[in-house]
Amino acid sequence: MEGPREVLERILYDGFATGNDAIVDEVCAPDLIEHQFGLAGRGDQAREHVKAAIRQVYEMMPDIVYTLEDSVVVGDVVWARGRARGTATGSFFGPPSNAPIDIALFEMARVVDGRIVEHWGSPDRFALLAQTGVLARLS
């Protein structure tokens, strides 16, 4: 059975990086508790939020590449720091900017029996807004 880091890698590499929202059904428990801002929820609601996020991220940056740079696993919990890099060729609060994107990610997930049962995520959304030019358009 996969450990917590491997399960987290699967949802990033086989889900968010490919647009494959079906991965949620494989690696997230039916009673998932999602804490990430904008995706928060429980059960089916949480799973649907994560699926929508996978589709949205992939539509904005279909060349996105995730890299986990550091992680710590203690029991059933993984804490990870990484990066998401790609090109904003899809729309994001306006037309595509075609800007290169490089943002930091911080992830924490509790994994039981090979499935994520609880998740906290903190992608650097401010950097994403700045790098895509959204902030410049607002000023």
Image (cartoon, rainbow, N blue to C red):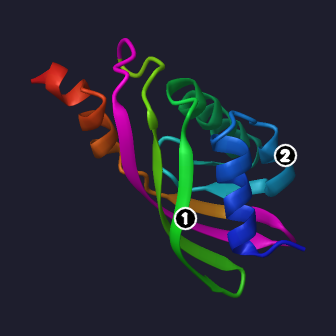
Distance Cα–Cα, label 1 vs label 2? 22 Å
Q: Is mark 2 on a helix, strand or loop?
A: helix
Q: Do the residues labelled 1 and 2 touch (CB within 8 Å)?
A: no
Quadrant in which the C terminus appears: top left
Mark 2 burial class by Cα count in 10 Å: few <14, some 14-19, many 20+: few
- Tell me the residue at 54%/58% (across/down): 67
Tell me which amino acid carries mark 2: Asp
Going by the picture, which residue comes out furthest to the top? 95
Residue 75 % position (x, y): 70, 87
- Tell me the residue at 61%/61% (across/down): 119
Q: Quadrant of residue 23?
A: top right
Q: Is mark 1 on a helix, strand or loop?
A: strand
Question: Where is 79 relative to 46, above or below?
Answer: below
Q: In this view, does 41 lie to the left or right of 128?
A: right
Q: Quadrant of residue 45?
A: top right
Q: Is residue 9 on the magenta stretch?
A: no
Residue 131 % position (x, y): 28, 35
| Part of the protein shown in magenta | 94-117
Foreground: 126 or 100? 100
Foreground: 29 or 100? 100
Going by the picture, which residue comes out furthest to the right? 1
Quadrant in which the N terminus appears: bottom right
Q: Is residue 104 on the magenta stretch?
A: yes
Foreground: 107 or 100? 100
Name the mark on residue 68: 1
Tell me which amino acid carries mark 1: Leu
Question: Is residue 112 at least partly visible in the picture?
Answer: yes
Mark 1 burial class by Cα count in 10 Å: few <14, some 14-19, many 20+: some
- Tell me the residue at 50%/26% (across/down): 60
Name the mark on residue 25: 2
Residue 121 % position (x, y): 50, 57
Earlier along the polypeptide chain: callout 1 or callout 2? 2
